[in-house]
Amino acid sequence: MHPSLLLGFDGPDADVVQAADPLRVVLHHTAFFASKALVAGRVVSVTVGGANALDATYSIRIEDRTAPRLVGGQTTGQHAVDIAFDVAVKVTDASGSSLIPLDFPAVLVTVVAAEAYGPMVRLGGDPEMTPDARYEVTAAGVADIPCNPVLAPYDRVVVQCFRPARPGARRFDLSSMLPRPNRREGQTGDLSRFIACLQEVTDPLLAEVDRFPEVFDIERAPEVIVDLTLADLGNPFPFDLDELGKRRLASVLVEMYRQNVTARGIINAVRFFVAVEIQAVRAYAGEALVLGESELGVDWILGPSSRFALYPFDVIVDVPLTDAQRSQLRAIVEFRKPDRTHFVNLIEPVRQRSSTTGSLGSARSA
């Protein structure tokens, strides 16, 4: 057998080398195998005399050399374009793609971000694209998982820019607002092109105005707007809250202000932040010398002054607290109580020594 007799495997490097014992056969395929093809080869041999025989089949998988293809695209916002490929891809250069306007007037957009989600890549552009204008997207800096880059002509697609929803009855056409004499005099088209540039800026501004209800809605507003809302309301609580906690607080903070300096306000605030139910807010009974029972220097506690005795109170909870809960509860009560009053004891089912010592210390300092 000689490689020249194997049709398709008789390339220039095909060879047969017969040594004293081994036989070396080199097959040179004259054409490339298809990408990811499974190629099987069978080896049959027998030694002189037939003592040792070999009949085995081996297979190899050809590497993936097929470039991914861009199959479609769609704008999902004035700054975002989603492009889809026929296979899963990855981004190798976030700023390699481009957005070229095909209609005029239209703003030039630079791709500043790209992120892959399986077979889809989301491009982020700046500044915002012109509504209704067509843009040609050229995908560069994108490759499939085996690192085959996107190749022309399957690296581009035309998308129409996203236009935000607007009321059906709205008619805000700047050209129609011009006086008729001005429109009649604009024979060269310069006026219409200038007004089109102004219209291109006006439409996104109107879209931002339409989004105001979403900004004012605590449930739908972006987190940064919720933070600004809390700052505008003068959020007095220094606790770190997650996004859901911020939204809940922004929705009830005004009502908390209305219930301020009341026992009900303290109970509701503790329930909101600490998730602990206050059993009671009661007047501080005080501790003093009991005639015939107290021992001097042992359990004799000097009672408070008459002015202090008018305004102290204790808070009673029905569950033991952690150190973090205890610290938060004290901070909330100190903020919500009337200025003239004094928070003395935090009473728990299992009274902590640190809490007791702190409470007595506060009472003495008051």
Image (cartoon, rainbow, N blue to C red):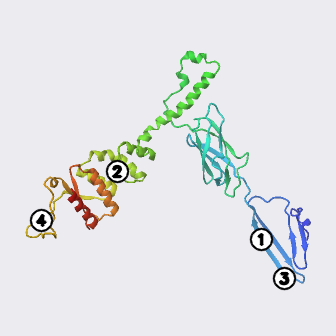
- Report the disc number at residue 332: none
In the rendered structure, find residue 58 and report the number of the disc placed on it.
1
Q: Nearer the viewer, mark 4 or mark 2?
A: 4
Quadrant placement of the C terminus: bottom left
As drawn, which residue projects farthest toward the left? 292
**Rendered position, 158 above or below 198:** below
Foreground pick, 92 / 150: 92
The residue positioned 60% from the left and 23% from the top of the image is 192
The kind of residue on which mark 1 rests is Tyr
Q: Mark 2 to mark 3: distance in Å? A: 87 Å
The amino acid pointed to by label 2 is: Phe
- Crowding around mark 4 (Cα neighbors within 10 Å: few <14, some 14 to 19, many 20+) is some
Residues marked 2 and 3 touching at CB (< 8 Å) = no
Q: Is 276 in front, or is 170?
A: 276
Image check: 113 left or right of 284? right
Q: Image height check: is 365 above or below 188?
A: below
Residue nearest the observer in this picture, 233 or 64: 233
Residue that label 3 marks: 52
2 vs 3, front mark: 2
Residue 26 placement (x, y as % from top left): 86, 68
